[in-house]
Amino acid sequence: MTLAPALYMQGSAAIDGVPIFRALDLHVAAGQWTCLLGSSGVGKSTVLKLFARLAEHVEFNGEFGAEGGDLTGRVALMAQSDLLLPWLSVSENVALGARLRGDAPDKSKVSHVLDRVGLADKAARRPGELSGGQRQRVALARTLMEDRPVVLLDEPFSALDAKNRSLMQELTAEVLQDRTVLLVTHDPVEAARLGHAINLMTDRGIETVTPPPGTVPRAVDDEIVLKVQAALLARLRED
Amino acid sequence: MKSWQAGIASALLGIAIWQAIVWIGDLQKFILPGPALVAETLWTSRGFILENAWITLQEVLLGLILGALIGGISAIMLASSPVARALVRPMLVFTQAIPVFALAPILNLWLGFGLTSKVVMALIIVYFPVTSAFFDALIRVNPDWLGLARVMGAGKWRTMWHIRIPAALPGFASGLRLAAVYAPIGAIIGEWVGASKGLGYLMLLANGRAKIDLMFASLIVLAVMAICLHSLTDLFCRKFLDRSES
């Protein structure tokens, strides 16, 4: 993995002339977790799609990118849906990137990342045989396998039940350490637990909120974490 | 009742109704021969019928395989190139507006009265359902999969090979199932317009000589052949192409 860069985005976006967000000013620190918290429809996923270069249909006015050069080939993506291919085995899904680039998959690395997410014994299974939490762990292994300095997370935990969600948050925070992570979420709990920096995105733009102290992932029952998440929820409800 | 039992029961019921119509209507055997006479003809002319059935079977199988192959390749080309799509799709729709019957005499003129014209006839009739079902499935692949592939740095053809084609195989299968039903129609039309062999030819011949029992015997063989073809295609699709999306 090359050194994790900082990301920036300043500008406004629209689709077919309808504004998605105005006057956005976002800074994502290098090698840290930055949460972009906001309600549905505020345009936070569009921010992520722009960084991933999956937003041809969006008219963006301004500039965005990574410090120290082009983002191409330096980004990995993990979404709310696990996007596993049902006809491939777990290990083939994890090695999908190599397959799609025409490279030979590094088998020892595949078993290493599967081991890291605790699914070493499921390598030969099909996604259909796994639970929702396990499937999302395979998606995490696939993201790790790509080994990119920048990781874009689009509400990757929101389809999981409460227990799996909290376990998955911890595992993801642990394995994606030292990478530049932009986590898009609508969940104040998640932002308070995982963000080195928290950006609240509303119709008026972005507002930075001081995160709780302590290392990421923070404990769910930490008093300050609870307070910050309550404050974040209150701010979300104001709009 | 198991499905094979139900099948046999339904066939027996059909034969009973057939016989009842013959008795009640007091029909002459050159209008509607009874099941016993048809069975007898089927047995006494078995060599002759099977010989012609083999010809028709070859036409149908070749037409089906070639049509599925060419249809599959066309669908991939159409799905991968917007230019091809813009140019070729209206043409495809236009050719579909021509009744296949109208093409048969031309094909006979160009390709002769032998096997080729019937194979091409079956191919043409098979081509469109395969192409359109497979193409639709290729176009409707989950766009998030394609986005993920792009972020991973995949090229267009690798994405096609590793994601779009495998994802669209169930669509190809539904096209193939329709094709298995249509292919015999194409071959028979071809034989009606001009042939010296095949079940379609045999039926015309028998009809012309008022051998209605032979006509019915040929028709039954044709129906059995079509049902077998459909079942085998279905089995093939289930084994290799279908997939329950999870």
Image (spheres, coloured by chain):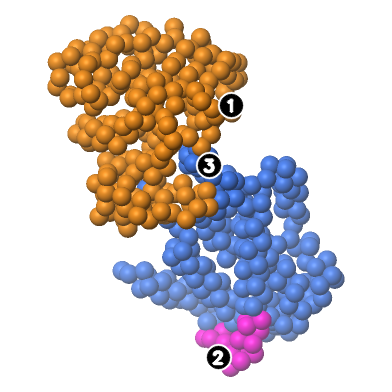
Chain colours: A orange, B blue
Between A211 and B88, the one nearer to me in the picture: A211
* Residue type at the position of mark 3: Gly
Provide residue A148's location: percent of width, then percent of height.
Answer: 43, 37
The residue indicated by pointer 3 is B153
Residue B127 appears in view: yes
Task: For label 2, count other residues whose C-alpha is less than 10 Å away and answer few (under 14), some (14-19) or many (20+).
Answer: few
Q: Is residue B227 above or below residue A211?
A: below
Q: The residue marked by circle 2 belongs to what chain?
A: B
Mark 3 vs mark 1: in front: 3
Q: Quadrant of the N terminus of chain A?
A: top left
Q: The residue marked by circle 3 belongs to what chain?
A: B
- Circle 2: element type: helix
Between A32 and A24, the one nearer to me in the picture: A32
* Residue type at the position of mark 2: Trp
Say which quarter of the image contains residue A156: top left
Q: Magenta segment, which residues?
A: B36-55
* The stretch drawn in magenta includes residue B240: no
Q: The residue marked by circle 1 belongs to what chain?
A: A
Residue B33 appears in view: no
Disc on the earlier residue, 2 or 3: 2
Separation of residues labelled 2 and 3 (CA atoms) = 65 Å
The residue indicated by pointer 2 is B43
Separation of residues labelled 3 and 1 (CA atoms) = 20 Å
- Circle 1: element type: loop
Q: Residue at x 48, y 35 (%)?
A: A74
Compared across the picture, whether B215 is left or right of A193 comes to right
The residue indicated by pointer 1 is A57
- Marks 1 and 2: same chain? no
Q: Residue at x 53, y 86 (%)?
A: B39
